């Protein structure tokens, strides 16, 4: 068993204590010589910064300001709140680029009370039938649409409809304009 410096210090201290507490031991009693530690292999080094090869990409500025919340999930495993198209800024998104997830469905700027019903799930992809009231406010008919939603994380999803597909990212309320928060 290799002798480490801490074991040598402990043994030396114990020998000194036992010599002092032994009534037969006098001042002339010689202490056991200290054992020099054996050279050991160099300790593993830990890099001071992230390894550029294995480190993940740094978080986007929006992600650094996401408020903690328990509002996750519902029909889809997404954080409740406002999502905007991933190619626009959270600070000034156009109406067409906004989706609000409330645990029941994904509403747009001109829809409300959306209710998504999951028809099938394959991995992270959900086939849903979503019905919404087609007006931001006031009386309006409810309409349904078949959608495919692929959830990349609870902060990002891709929505596929007949009109095409678009990816959305979560935006913290602190990053959104006051009228959207």
Image (cartoon, rainbow, N blue to C red):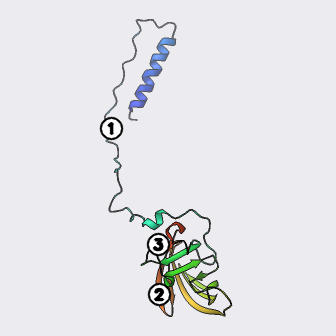
Name the element at disc 2. strand
Q: Is residue 23 above or below residue 177?
A: above
Give the mark toward the camera: 1 or 3: 3
Give the distance between the C-alpha atoms of the residues marked 3 and 2, in whole angstroms.
Answer: 22 Å
Which residue is painted at 68% across and 90% down in the image?
A: 139
Residue 6 percent coordinates (x, y) = 42, 30
Q: Is residue 19 above or below residue 10?
A: above
Give the mark toward the camera: 3 or 2: 3
With 118 as the anchor, is 17 left or right in this view?
Answer: left
Q: Which mark is residue 151?
A: none
Q: Which mark is residue 165?
A: 2
Viewer-closest of 136 and 54 = 136
Q: Which residue is mark 3?
A: 91
Q: Which residue is mark 1?
A: 40
The first of marks 2 and 1 along the sequence is 1
The first of marks 1 and 3 along the sequence is 1
Residue 10 percent coordinates (x, y) = 45, 26
Sort mark 3 into few (<14), some (14-19) or many (20+) by Cα contacts within 10 Å. some
With 117 as the anchor, is 47 left or right in this view?
Answer: left
Q: Residue furthest right?
A: 139
């Amino acid at each position: 068993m290799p002798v480490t410096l801490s074991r040598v210090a402990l043994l030396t201290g114990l020998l000194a204590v036992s010599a002092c507490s032994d009534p037969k031991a006098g001042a002339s009693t010689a202490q056991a010589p200290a054992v020099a530690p054996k050279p050991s292999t160099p300790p593993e080094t830990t890099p001071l910064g992230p390894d550029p090869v294995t480190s993940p990409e740094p978080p986007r500025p929006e992600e650094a300001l996401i408020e903690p919340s328990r509002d996750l999930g519902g029909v889809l495993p997404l954080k409740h709140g406002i999502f905007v198209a991933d190619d626009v800024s959270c600070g000034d998104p156009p109406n067409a680029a906004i989706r609000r997830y409330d645990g029941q469905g994904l509403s747009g700027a001109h829809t409300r009370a959306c209710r998504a019903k999951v028809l099938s799930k394959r991995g992270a992809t959900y086939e849903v039938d979503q019905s919404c009231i087609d007006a931001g406010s006031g009386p309006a008919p409810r309409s349904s649409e078949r959608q495919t939603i692929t959830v990349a994380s609870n902060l990002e999803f891709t929505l596929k409809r007949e009109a095409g597909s678009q990816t959305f990212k979560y935006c913290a309320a602190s990053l959104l304009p006051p009228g959207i928060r």
